[in-house]
Image (tube, grey):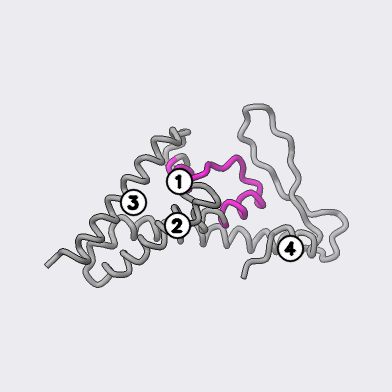
């Protein structure tokens, strides 16, 4: 059960306001507490919770990526790896029918939180976001997506092989 951020904003009397960055600039949008807040300090508390949630989702993303790339190597984790591959494929392809190919529930939730916290613009892919942050460059989206899909599908093939054909 997830409460929409707009509901939280209304109930706590807080909101996000654009600072109108310069054209071509990547300045963030900052959240500010409204002067008419019914709950003094509520915006600070909510912001703290959202920052912690953002960091937890970041850690979850890293664990998922690491497990997708390496989980097939550990015999006791191979079945769990296969299940995670299936869940991600269902999200990318199944939910992708409605939200666009490559849709990820974790990324979608994290992007909503990051936008609320004022981090914009955000790429469509978490992997692109992570690589841009690590390299300090704006990498080509198409190239990152191709390598991401290649790594995922190779990992999926290896997972099927070690789960069903490895003796």
The magenta stretch is 109-131
Q: Is residue 113 magenta?
A: yes
For numbered disc 2, what is the local secondary structure? Answer: helix
Q: Residue at x 63, y 67 (%)?
A: 2
Which residue is disc 1 drawn over? 130
Q: Residue furthest left?
A: 167
- The label nearer to you, 2 versus 3, is 3
Spatial CA distance of label 2 from label 4 is: 25 Å
Q: Residue 136 at x, y = what percent?
A: 46, 36
Q: Residue furthest bottom?
A: 76
Q: Residue 134 at x, y = what percent?
A: 43, 42
Task: Give the side of residue 81 with respect to residue 14, left or right.
Answer: left
**Where is the C terminus found, in terms of image quarters?**
bottom left
Spatial CA distance of label 2 from label 3 is: 14 Å
For numbered disc 3, what is the local secondary structure? Answer: helix
Which residue is disc 2 drawn over? 61
Choose the circle earlier in sequence order: 1 or 3. Answer: 1
Q: Is residue 59 magenta?
A: no
Q: Residue at x 72, y 60 (%)?
A: 44
Q: Residues within 10 Å of mark 2 (few under 14, many from 20)?
A: some
Above or below, 60 against 136 in this view is below
Which residue is disc 3 drawn over? 152
């Amino acid at each position: 059960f997830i409460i929409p951020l707009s509901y939280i904003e209304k109930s706590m009397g807080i909101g996000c306001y654009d600072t109108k960055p310069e054209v071509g600039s990547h300045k963030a949008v900052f959240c500010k507490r409204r002067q008419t807040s019914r709950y003094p300090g509520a915006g600070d508390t909510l912001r703290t919770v959202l920052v912690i949630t953002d960091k937890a989702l970041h850690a979850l993303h890293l664990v998922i990526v690491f497990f997708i790339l390496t989980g097939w190597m550990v015999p006791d984790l191979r079945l769990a790896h296969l299940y995670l591959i299936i869940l991600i494929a269902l999200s990318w392809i199944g939910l992708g029918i409605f939200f666009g190919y490559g849709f990820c529930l974790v990324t979608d939730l994290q992007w909503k939180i990051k936008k609320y916290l004022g981090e914009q613009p955000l790429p469509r892919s978490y992997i692109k976001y992570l690589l841009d942050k690590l390299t300090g460059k704006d990498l080509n989206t198409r190239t990152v997506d191709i390598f991401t899909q290649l790594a995922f599908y190779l990992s999926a093939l290896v997972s099927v092989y070690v789960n069903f054909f490895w003796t």
